[in-house]
Every structure is written in structure tokens, then in C-alpha cells.
Image (spheres, grey):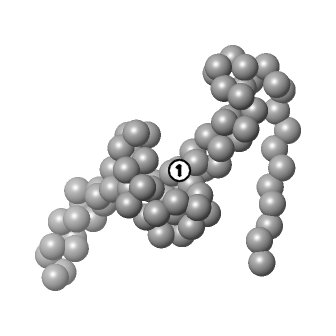
Amino acid sequence: MERQITINYPEVLAASLKMASGEFEKEIKTLSMVKLYELGKVSSGMAAKVLDITRIRFLDLLSIYHVSYFPEAEELEADFINA
């Protein structure tokens, strides 16, 4: 089952970013998935599914938004120690 979220925004917002309404709405959806991934709330696979793209494409998007694919150094070190 899918749900839908509606966000009201003034047309001037998309225009100020030099985006068409559809492009702006896609950007908001992408940004929300990138942020949820960054916060550890969704997996890269789930984010890719929501965005209807491949997981590899989602991982490529992370670099565009300056979000690391890799865990924080402390988490990586802990994983290494516990391996």
C-alpha cells in the first residue's frame, strides 16, 4: 500500500530556484530520501525504491548532496574492532 504526502508551497518558491513545479517537487522528494538516509532512518535500497531509481543511482546522488555513503569514522572503527 502506498500513501501520499501533500506539501503546500508558494509558486514563487520553485520560481526563485529557477525550477518548474514538477522539477521542484521531484527535488523535494529526493532531498527527503537523501536526508532520511543520512540520518540512518532508511536504507539506500528503500530510498531508491521510493525514488524509483536503482540503488547505484541513489548512491551516486549522495555525492551530489555531499552525503557520505560510508558510516562515520567512529562507527567504521567499531565495526572493524568487532569484526
* Left or right of residue 45, residue 69 in this image: left
Q: In terms of depth relative to the viewer, which is nearer, 22 or 75?
A: 22
In percent of width and height, residue 8 lies at: 85, 38
Please count the marks in the image.
Answer: 1
In percent of width and height, residue 35 lies at: 53, 50
Residue positioned 48% across, 69% down in the render: 45
Residue positioned 43% across, 64% down in the render: 55
* Left or right of residue 25, residue 11 in this image: right
* Left or right of residue 69, residue 41 in this image: right
In percent of width and height, residue 49 lies at: 56, 67
* Above or below, 75 relative to 58: below
* Crowding near the residue tagged with mark 1, few <14, some 14–19, many ≥20 C-alpha atoms within 10 Å: some
* Above or below, 17 relative to 31: above
One can see residue 51 in this view? yes
Q: Residue furthest bottom?
A: 83
Q: Secondary structure at mark 1?
A: helix
- For the C terminus, the image quarter is bottom left
Residue positioned 66% across, 26% down in the render: 19
Residue 78 quadrant: bottom left
One can see residue 28 in this view? no
Residue positioned 71% across, 28% down in the render: 20
* Above or below, 7 relative to 69: above
In percent of width and height, residue 18 lies at: 64, 20
The residue under label 1 is 35
Residue 1 quadrant: bottom right
Q: Amino acid at mark 1?
A: Lys
* Left or right of residue 56, residue 31 in this image: right
